[in-house]
Amino acid sequence: MDTGSAPRTEPSADGPALDEPLDVAVVGAGQSGLACGYFLRRWAQDVERGRSPGPAPRFALFDASSEPGGSWPRHWPSLRLFSPAEHSSLPGRRMPGSGEDNPDAAHVVDYLADYESRYDLPVRRGVRVASVSRQDGRFALRDDDGRLLALSRTVVSATGSYTRPFVPALPGTADFTGRQRHSSAYTGPQEYAGRRVLVVGGGNSGAQIAADLHGTAAVTWATQRPPRFMPDDVDGRVLFRLASARVLGRQLEQVGTPGEDLGDIVAVPAVRAARDAGTMDAVPVPSRLTAHGAAWDTDAGRRHGWPSGAGAPAAAAVRGTEQRFDDVLWCTGFRPELRHLRGLLQEPTRSGRPRMHEHLRTASADVDGLYLLGYGDWCGPASATLTGVGVFARATVADIQKTLHRGG
């Protein structure tokens, strides 16, 4: 159900004039930034309608991209959501059906573009916030040339992780003479036709890309641990409930929250079909890359749970061998894009993440008025998903509202 204002035909290019400080600056206008913008807009509407004490918040969203949709326009065309459209929605507006069980990336882009327009969110496109610092009691947002973009009382960082692809330091990586790409640069199977491709990564992107390439390329799928497919009836709805249950279990100091061991890979239709056809047999990650391929030691994968012999025939077949490859596709994830906050945040925790406040997982423990939204479970369980970010966007805006009202 749509609970917001009437739709607009074009997205808003305007917003508060920046000659005066903002109350809230949102850095990033992907799914997390838009969810935050929705609750900021609703706060402003509540003030206008007398439901909330004023003044209404002055806010703007800054996004480096010239087009809506966050990272979704850059995903490969066959990428599928884990859940049906109606269960993959941001707050206020349900994603319309796509005619398929699992919508593709293009459908998500259309939904996010409509969402941004429908709620008249003041997104400043093509504006990259390169740094955030403190200036005269405010946050100062600057571009790559050091020019001041805005001053703001609070900042919500919602930049995601897509611009920080991670590639592990596998020995021999620099020696390989073929092509190496991260999954963020994958555009589909066509350019790999007839080539020998090593897909490295045991998560959902590795599984989906390996399945996408089968029938077009000669694919070897390498994972650190033996892949575990979730039951066919498990989708994003179940994963969201389990993520919340795990966090609750930790809070209650419980061990073994039910449902934690379902597996690692969601069996979306393409992956399920490839698995059932017997083309998703994985091997351990190679011990090293070579000039023309990859090599496996005789004990490759053993310390990560790969069995020997008949227990994993594909793994046994590559141990002690060198295989030739034309391409390596790294499906090895991302790191949070926080480089614009380097001048603010303290040294990260042992996990490499910023310290977050105990009372609110999106609030920085080191910098008052700074919030981090949608980067992963460390700032809210399932907060990096379409269906999961809304509850944390709501809590973030509620905390900002209290903070600004206290400050006058």
Image: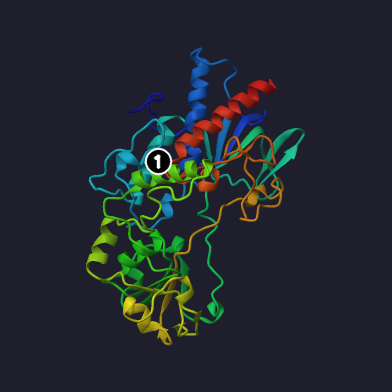
Residue occupying the point 49% across, 79% down: 287
Q: Quadrant of residue 192?
A: bottom left
Mark yes or no: residue 58 visible.
Answer: no
Q: Is residue 355 above or below residue 216?
A: above
Q: What is the x, y in percent for residue 146?
A: 70, 47
Q: Is residue 17 above or below residue 223?
A: above
Quarter that holds the N terminus: top left
Query: What residue is disc 1 on?
Result: 387
Taking depth in this image into account, of 113 and 388 the one nearest to the observer is 388
Taking depth in this image into account, of 65 and 294 the one nearest to the observer is 294
Taking depth in this image into account, of 166 and 229 the one nearest to the observer is 229
Residue occupying the point 32% across, 68% down: 213
Mark yes or no: residue 38 visible.
Answer: yes
Q: What is the x, y in percent for residue 347?
A: 70, 52
Mark 1: secondary structure? loop
Dot 1 surroundings within 10 Å: few (below 14), some, or many (20 or more)?
many
Left or right relative to 342: residue 203: left
- Check the image and name the residue furthest to the right: 136
Left or right relative to 210: residue 293: right
Q: Is residue 242 above or below residue 327?
A: above
Q: Quadrant of residue 209?
A: bottom left
Q: Is residue 327 above or below residue 346?
A: below
